Structures are given as C-alpha cells and as structure tokens.
C-alpha cells in the first residue's frame, strides 16, 4: 500500500505519544503528548489535521525518526524537515523561520526573536505566534523565553512544566548575560 499524500499518525516516544499530520507540502501539525494516545489524537484532529490515519511517506518517517531521537535526548537539527505553513500569515512565517535558526540548547527572548526576524517591537505578537505554532519542537518555540530569560508561557500540554522539561533536556543556555536569566530552570 502506498502512503497517502495527506494524513496523520501517532508514535510513542520517551516524552509520550506524539501526533504528526502532513500534506504534500510537508509536516502540517505536530501534537506534543497529552495524557494518553487517544487524547493526543483528539487534540491533533481538533487542530484541523487530515482525519485519515495513514502510513506516513518517507519524508515524514524521517521526521518521526528525528523526533524520536530528540525525545531520547539526542541533539537533533530539524531544519531540513519540510513544513506546510500555508495557514500562517507572513509575520508568523518570518517568526517561525527565525525560530528554526535557534540551535539545540540555544534560547532567545520574544523581543530578540521579533527583532532578528525583522519585526522590532513586536514581542507580544511574537509570543502569540509561538502560542499558535503548528509544529512545536520542529519550530522550537520552547527555546523562546520572556524578557530577562523568564520562562514565559507555553501552550502545549503541560504548559511551563513541558517547556522546562524540554529546555532541561537540551541543557539550554540563557539568552542574556549571566545573572539576568531565571536559570537554572
């Protein structure tokens, strides 16, 4: 059976059950673990993902393998994974592109990210873009912190605890000079 051009699947990692949805353009959504497999699937489908569970094509299987390695504590670069960001406006695309340039364990603030993406003074809007990130981990919104290196919000299941867990797993570095950030987590 040939993999479908659009669909979704769930896979188990050390972080829990993760859901991934794709279209011909690339990965559309990534759902971080909920309390169980069924809840993860329900949240993924609620986000407007294709409703057909399917065997992922090779490029999505590669993304899944990378996410599994990441969840196992391996340093992984997700920059080559193709994404379908057609539902995102140009501002969000710019913010997401810039966030993807953050390397493993590197952090920044919402304000600094906005500025480096060409949108100075738009920290609040950048926070909103991160809150609606369709593919967390691949677009590493957990690496974006509030001013002064404070944790800030995190809209994924588990909220700040999940963000903290991901940052600790990466042994993240503060975005500002020593003593100004709320590290260690």
Image: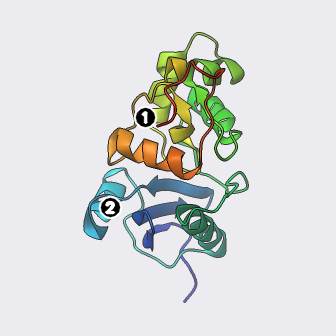
In the rendered image of this protein, does residue 131 appear above or below residue 61?
A: above
- CA gap, disc 2 to disc 1? 18 Å
Mark 2 touches mark 1? (CB < 8 Å): no
Considering only order in the chain, which callout, 1 or 2, is on the residue closer to the N terminus?
2
Q: Helix, strand, or loop for circle 1?
A: helix
Query: Which residue is tagged 1?
Result: 131
Which quadrant of the view contains residue 98? top right
Q: Residue furthest bottom?
A: 1
Query: Looking at the picture, how far across and down is residue 55, in whole percent?
Result: 50, 79
Q: Please indicate, yes or no, whether residue 77 appears anywhere in the rendered image.
A: yes
- Quadrant of the frame with the N terminus: bottom right
Residue beneath the point at 54% across and 23% down:
181
Query: Looking at the picture, how far across and down is residue 31, in whole percent?
Result: 42, 56
Q: Please indicate, yes or no, whether residue 135 appears anywhere in the rendered image.
A: no
Query: Which residue is tagged 2?
Result: 40
Residue beneath the point at 47% across and 55% down:
30
For residue 31, side relative to residue 71 (left or right)? left
In the rendered image of this protein, does residue 34 appear above or below residue 108?
A: below
Which quadrant of the view contains residue 32? bottom left
In the rendered image of this protein, does residue 40 appear above or below residue 136?
A: below
Query: Looking at the picture, how far across and down is residue 92, in whole percent?
Result: 56, 31
Residue beneath the point at 27% across and 66% down:
36
Q: Helix, strand, or loop for circle 2?
A: helix
């Amino acid at each position: 059976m040939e993999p479908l051009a659009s669909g979704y699947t769930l896979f188990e990692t050390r972080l829990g059950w993760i859901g991934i949805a794709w279209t011909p353009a690339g990965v559309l959504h990534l759902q971080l673990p909920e309390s169980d497999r069924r809840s993860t699937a329900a949240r993924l489908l609620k986000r407007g993902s294709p409703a057909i569970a399917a065997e992922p094509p090779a490029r999505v299987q590669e993304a899944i393998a990378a996410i599994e390695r990441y969840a196992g504590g391996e340093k992984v670069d997700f920059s080559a994974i193709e994404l379908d960001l057609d539902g995102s406006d140009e501002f969000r695309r710019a913010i997401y592109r810039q966030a993807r340039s953050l390397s493993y364990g590197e952090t920044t603030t919402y304000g600094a990210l906005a500025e480096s993406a060409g949108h100075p003074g738009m920290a609040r809007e950048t926070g909103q873009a991160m809150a609606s990130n369709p593919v967390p981990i691949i677009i590493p919104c957990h690496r974006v912190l509030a001013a002064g290196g404070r944790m800030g919000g995190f809209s994924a299941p588990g909220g700040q605890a999940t963000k903290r867990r991901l940052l600790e797993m990466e042994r993240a570095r503060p975005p500002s000079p020593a003593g100004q950030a709320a590290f260690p987590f």
